[in-house]
Image (tube, helix red, strand yellow):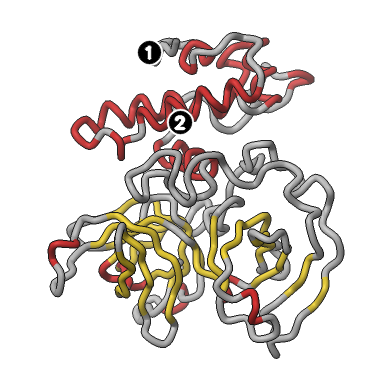
Amino acid sequence: MSDINSDDYYKVLGVSRDAEENDINRAYKKLALKYHPDKNPDNREKAEENFKKVSEAYDVLSDAKKRKAYDQFGKQGLQGGMGEGGMGGFGGGPGMSFTNAEDIFRQFFGGGSPFAFGDDDDGPFGGMPFGMGGMGGKGMRFSFGGPMGGMGMGGMPGMGGMGGMGGRGRPRGPQRPDVIPAGTKVAIYGLQSAPHHNGKLASILEHDRNSGRYTVETQSGDNLALKPSNFTQVTAAVIRGLKSKPELNGKKGKIMRWDEDKGRYAIQIPGQTLSLQPANLQLEQSTVVRIEGLSGAAQYNGSWGKIVDVDMEAQRYQLQLDASKQLKVRWENVRV
């Protein structure tokens, strides 16, 4: 049984000190769903505190190196100077922020939120996390979306899937704020050389910094290397400020695609699909977005960043662009 107020990570998750990886995953999933602030709207402050405790424990115990250091030296071993051979400590551990906790949560559940339709396990993208080890190697890797709409074949993917990935689809090491996390679900569109892939759903496997492309895997097992302009993130959003149908304001749905001609998203809510402007959709914290349409700071157009705060009154997002730079933009000036 979990002891959420314990200083012992094993007791926080309610697992034994010899717990297997699957036991730790199951414990985290149960407790993260229980304590997530979205599940506790009447007591968000306390829920967030508990959610961070659960995430901190999971972040350490799910990582073999962090767990070994913790088992040997306790929390002090995670802060530097106590590791084997004088290693300099690890990220995560004591004092986890809500943003980092939410990152772990979203990546565990495939890059999105399992609460998109008010369900925990049975929604279209809820339940077990995507990006399981070994998901690569199912098919050839193709590159689409070139300057002339051409196609290039990039060889066979590794048999073990994306390098450095654990069984939970969560990348090791720090997550860059301008890169969409592995496991995020996307909808493909705008391919000219391989239009038969348009409309398909896929999961992000990895990002290539040199080409700027993302390797995605379709549900049929094809691996494609796509430019960000050829997919939309399938992500949760809340309807806000809709004057034509005010009864829909506050409803949560899932963005399914972007209509470039209309400048609108197709967002799916229970029972219907709506066509809405970005200004009428509030994205979740930790969503990675592209900046568009800025006039006063046009140099940032085309840049990517992660939402770290949402100003509901001003309808603005606080974006983390890199380790040191943040920018505040209106809701209508970002795309997923």
Residue name at image x 38 percent, y 80 percent: 293
Q: Residues within 10 Å of mark 1 (few under 14, many from 20)?
A: few
- Is residue 120 in sight in this rendering? yes
Residue lying at the far front in this picture: please name it.
271
Residue name at image x 70 percent, y 90 percent: 148
Q: Examine the rendered structure and indicate whether residue 67 appears above or below residue 255.
A: above
Q: In the rendering, which numbered label is found on residue 161?
A: none
Q: Secondary structure at mark 2?
A: loop
Q: Residues within 10 Å of mark 2 (few under 14, many from 20)?
A: some
Residue 223 spot, x, y in % from top left: 73, 63
Task: Using the image as rendered, state which of residue 212 and residue 86 is in the foreground.
Answer: 212
Q: Is residue 72 left or right of residue 136?
A: left
- Looking at marks 2 and 1 on the same chain, the residue that comes earlier in the sequence is marked by 1
Residue name at image x 38 percent, y 73 percent: 265
The N terminus - image quarter: top left
Residue 213 spot, x, y in % from top left: 67, 68
The amino acid marked with disc number 2 is Met
Residue 276 spot, x, y in % from top left: 30, 73
Q: Quadrant of residue 166?
A: top right
Q: Examine the rendered structure and indicate whether residue 236 appears above or below residue 126.
A: below
Q: How far apart are the alpha carbons under marks 2 and 1?
A: 15 Å
Q: Quadrant of residue 273?
A: bottom left
Residue name at image x 53 percent, y 51 percent: 323
Q: Is residue 311 left or right of residue 285?
A: left
Residue lying at the far bottom in this picture: please name it.
148
Q: Examine the rendered structure and indicate whether residue 226 appears above or below residue 190.
A: above
Residue 322 spot, x, y in % from top left: 52, 56
Q: In the rendering, which numbered label is found on residue 96?
A: 2
Q: In the rendering, which numbered label is found on residue 5?
A: 1
- Is residue 79 in sight in this rendering? no
Q: Secondary structure at mark 1?
A: loop
The amino acid marked with disc number 1 is Asn
